[in-house]
Each structure stands twice: as structure tokens, then as C-alpha cells.
């Protein structure tokens, strides 16, 4: 789904406002969310948990239970409290020793705990088509949820055209290099 403010970027955040008892949701991109937060003014903040970061967020500054601070890595003797406060480990053994505490922190920072690898290099045209395809798929899901079936059918057809363009482009590139 496209950002409802700039209509250029893919929306990655659902921003919700409650005004006079009515909830208004806006799908926004990260840039527009940052601008929206600046405009909101003092006294307002976004709801939801803030993942701990290396720079130290409010979530990272909350006091830790005493039992956690006592545990230490068997290899480097770094305490779990320091790992959670700083967001950094000292040695590879720390990952295993503090796995239960580190995994949620990594998931909050990186959106997952497994490395998925790099995407293959694509030319600009192919990359743009791929991004457009992802956007149209997100719009299709939204149209179906909102029961806008005519719009969903149009999006489905556009997705099929984009997929065939990407397939034909890959076959063309393969024959050119082969």
C-alpha cells in the first residue's frame, strides 16, 4: 500500500489518531511518519513498544530485575544487564548465554533474528518493476479486505502483467548473457 501522505513510498506504518472519539488510520512511510511526529507537537507520542537500540532508547533505560544483572557470560564474564542496556555483546558466547534476552531485542531492531541474505543485483528497470509489483500486491490485499472487488480485479490484472514483464525480462537477460 502506498503512503497516504506522499503517495510515493510503500507504507510501512499504520498511524492512528483519535479525534472526538473517532479513530482515523493512515498508512504512512517512515519519512512521513517522522514529519507527522514533528508536527504533532509536545504532549503527544505514538503508542506501542519501542525496541531497544544501540543508541539507547527509553525501553533500554528501564531498570532491570536484580536477578538478570547477576548472570554473566561464561567466556567473557559480561553481565546480562549491561548487554541489555547497551545493546552490545562482548563475545560470541554471549549470544548463546543470553539467547532468551537477545532474540527479542534483535527481532525488534532488525525485523527478524535470521539473516536472509542479500538480494541479487538487478538493473534499475527491473528493481522498479519489482517494487511496483510488491506495492500492487499490498494494494490488492487491502482492496479485498475493504471489499472493493472491481479495484481488486484491476489490480490483479496489473499484477499479472507485471509478473509476465518480469519473467520475460529475466528470460531476455538470460539469453543475452548465455
Image (cartoon, rainbow, N blue to C red):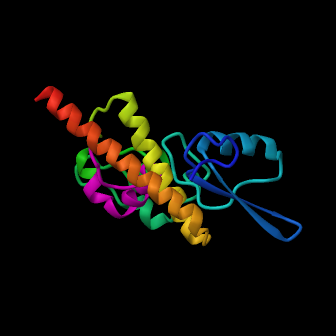
Residue 139 image point, x, y percent: 54, 57
Instruction: Please identify the dominant SS of the magenta region.
Output: helix
Residue 92 image point, x, y percent: 24, 46
Q: Quadrant of residue 105?
A: bottom left
- Residue 143 versus residue 57 in the image, above or below: below
For the question of whether residue 118 can be seen, the reply is no
Residue occupying the point 36% across, 60% down: 71
Q: Is residue 165 found left or right of 19 in the rendered image?
A: left
Please tell me which residue lies in front, 14 or 74.
14
- Residue 29 versus residue 108 in the image, above or below: above
Number of numbered discs on residues: 0
Residue 33 image point, x, y percent: 67, 45
Q: Is residue 97 magenta?
A: yes
Image quarter in which the C terminus is found: top left
Residue 114 image point, x, y percent: 30, 54
Q: Is residue 37 magenta?
A: no
Residue occupying the point 33% across, 58% down: 98
Q: Is residue 81 found left or right of 91 in the rendered image?
A: right
Give the extent of the magenta segment: 95-118
For the question of whether residue 51 can be seen, the reply is yes
Q: Is residue 55 found left or right of 88 in the rendered image?
A: right
Please tell me which residue lies in front, 36 or 109.
36
Please tell me which residue lies in front, 31 or 2.
2
Q: Quadrant of residue 150?
A: bottom right
Residue occupying the point 62% across, 51% down: 58
Amino acid at each position: 500500500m502506498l503512503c497516504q501522505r506522499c503517495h510515493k513510498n510503500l507504507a510501512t506504518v499504520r498511524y492512528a489518531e483519535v479525534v472526538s472519539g473517532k479513530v482515523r488510520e493512515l498508512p504512512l512511510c517512515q519519512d512521513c511518519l517522522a514529519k507527522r511526529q514533528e508536527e504533532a507537537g509536545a504532549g503527544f507520542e505514538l503508542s506501542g513498544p519501542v525496541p531497544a537500540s544501540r543508541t539507547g532508547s527509553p525501553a533500554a533505560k528501564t531498570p532491570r530485575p536484580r536477578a538478570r544483572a547477576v548472570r554473566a557470560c561464561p567466556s567473557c564474564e559480561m553481565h546480562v544487564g549491561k548487554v541489555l542496556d547497551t545493546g552490545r555483546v562482548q563475545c560470541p558466547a554471549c549470544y548463546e548465554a543470553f539467547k532468551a534476552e537477545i532474540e527479542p531485542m534483535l527481532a525488534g531492531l532488525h525485523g527478524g533474528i535470521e539473516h536472509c541474505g542479500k538480494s541479487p543485483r538487478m538493473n534499475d528497470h527491473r528493481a522498479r518493476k519489482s517494487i511496483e509489483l510488491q506495492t500492487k500486491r499490498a494494494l490488492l490485499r487491502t482492496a479485498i479486505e475493504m471489499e472493493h472487488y472491481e479495484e481488486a480485479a484491476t489490480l490483479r490484472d496489473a499484477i499479472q502483467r507485471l509478473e509476465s514483464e518480469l519473467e520475460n525480462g529475466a528470460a531476455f537477460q538470460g539469453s543475452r548473457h548465455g
